[in-house]
Image (cartoon, rainbow, N blue to C red):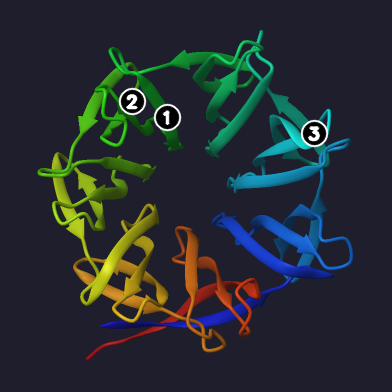
């Protein structure tokens, strides 16, 4: 069984680099692009062939990270501090033309990594002394969080049921990390058997977690954790496999490096891998997201230059059965 995809390029007006980062179930897409004339960058929202710029007033750079089913966009903006044009980072949610700052009280900077269907966000904040804290935010109420006994905790993903995934470090070897699920007060540690590092990247509404781990060989591989069991993902013939997301059907999107060093996207479902490589690609394709319809977003090398990337959306059209 193999999926066929229809590819649509995503090239923001006057942009020389378009990088889509999130797609919701209505096909709305957000990401970043680099402006040709000024070589500066900004965020964008794409829907039905139309682009809209996302730019927090007064910010040097605006970077969306995720769009939910309501069309709410979570992201981070950067403003100048002295000679540093990106000196202060501030998280935001954008909806219906308005930007709302996401910042726990008493903190000087913040960043978000995810937003769910109800507008809840997760992220990190730093106070004036440089002390960092992770937070879960819902309708303006903030809860700080860290795994008990950890030296460092990072929140990564959030589902519509309010469950959070991330990773943490407990020992002196900062390269060794453990994954976890935090669900309504309960912490479940996630450690792929035999792995040095376990790093979840996403959790769907069924509680299935997708992520990456370092195998005993030192190579990066992916995993799915569902109902107490791990399934490891290693694209056949690849040297590295990296997962970027999972949808509510259990489809996993990611990227892998082939033996020749080229990078390709892949979709995994029920034991089968499908390579994603737009026809116009010259050898480098990288997926960044997947929605519940199985639509994929990413970027590929369009020309010979190392920075000549074009964004794309790939939509499944039909299934061929052998």
Residue 165: give x, y in percent of width and height.
36, 34
Residue 299: give x, y in percent of width and height.
57, 70
Does the rendering let one see residue 141?
yes
Residue 159: give x, y in percent of width and height.
43, 38
Number of numbered tags placed on the structure image: 3
Check the image and report above or below for 20 versus 266. above
Mark 2 / mark 3, whichever is N-terminal:
3
Quick one: SS at disc 2? strand
Mark 2 / mark 1, whichever is N-terminal:
1
Q: Which mark is residue 44?
A: none
Check the image and report above or below for 282 versus 124. below
Mark 1 / mark 3, whichever is N-terminal:
3
Residue 316: give x, y in percent of width and height.
46, 77
* Disc 1 versus disc 3: nearer the observer: 3
Crowd class of label 3 (few under 14; some 14 to 19; many from 20; radius 10 Å): some
The C terminus sits in image quarter: bottom left
* Disc 2 versus disc 1: nearer the observer: 1
Q: Residue furthest left?
A: 194
Asked which quadrant contains residue 228, the reply is: top left
Q: Which mark is residue 79?
A: 3
Q: Residue at coordinates 57% horizontally, 88% vertically from top-left?
A: 280
Q: Which residue is mark 2?
A: 182
């Amino acid at each position: 069984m193999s999926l066929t995809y229809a590819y649509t390029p995503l090239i923001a007006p006057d942009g020389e680099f378009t990088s889509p980062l999130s797609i919701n179930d209505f096909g709305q897409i957000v990401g970043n692009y680099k402006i040709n004339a000024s070589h500066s960058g900004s965020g964008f929202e794409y829907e039905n062939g139309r682009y809209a710029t996302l730019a927090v007033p007064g910010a040097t750079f605006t970077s969306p990270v995720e769009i939910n089913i309501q069309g709410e966009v979570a992201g981070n903006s950067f403003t100048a501090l002295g000679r540093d044009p990106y000196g202060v980072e501030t998280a935001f949610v954008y909806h219906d033309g308005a930007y709302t700052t996401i910042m726990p009280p008493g903190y000087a900077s913040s960043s978000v990594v995810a937003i769910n269907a109800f507008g809840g966000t997760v992220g990190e904040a730093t106070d004036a002394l440089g002390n960092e804290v992770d937070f879960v935010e819902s309708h303006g109420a903030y809860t700080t969080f860290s795994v008990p006994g950890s030296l460092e905790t990072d929140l990564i993903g959030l589902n519509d049921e309010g469950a959070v995934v991330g990773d943490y470090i407990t020992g002196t070897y900062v390269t060794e990390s453990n994954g976890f699920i935090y669900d309504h007060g309960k912490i479940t540690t996630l450690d792929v058997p035999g792995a040095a590092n376990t790093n979840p990247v996403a959790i769907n509404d069924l509680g299935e977690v997708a992520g990456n781990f370092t195998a005993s060989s030192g190579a990066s591989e992916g995993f799915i954790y569902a109902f107490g069991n791990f399934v490891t993902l290693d694209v056949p013939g690849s040297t590295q496999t990296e997962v970027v997301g999972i949808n509510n059907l259990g489809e996993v999107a990611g990227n892998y490096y082939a033996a020749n060093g080229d990078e390709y996207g892949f979709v995994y479902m029920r034991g089968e891998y499908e390579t994603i490589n737009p026809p116009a690609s010259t050898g480098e394709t990288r997926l960044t997201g997947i929605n519940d319809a199985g639509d994929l977003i990413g970027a590929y090398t369009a020309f010979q230059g190392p920075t000549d990337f074009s964004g794309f959306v790939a939509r499944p059209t039909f299934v061929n059965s052998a």
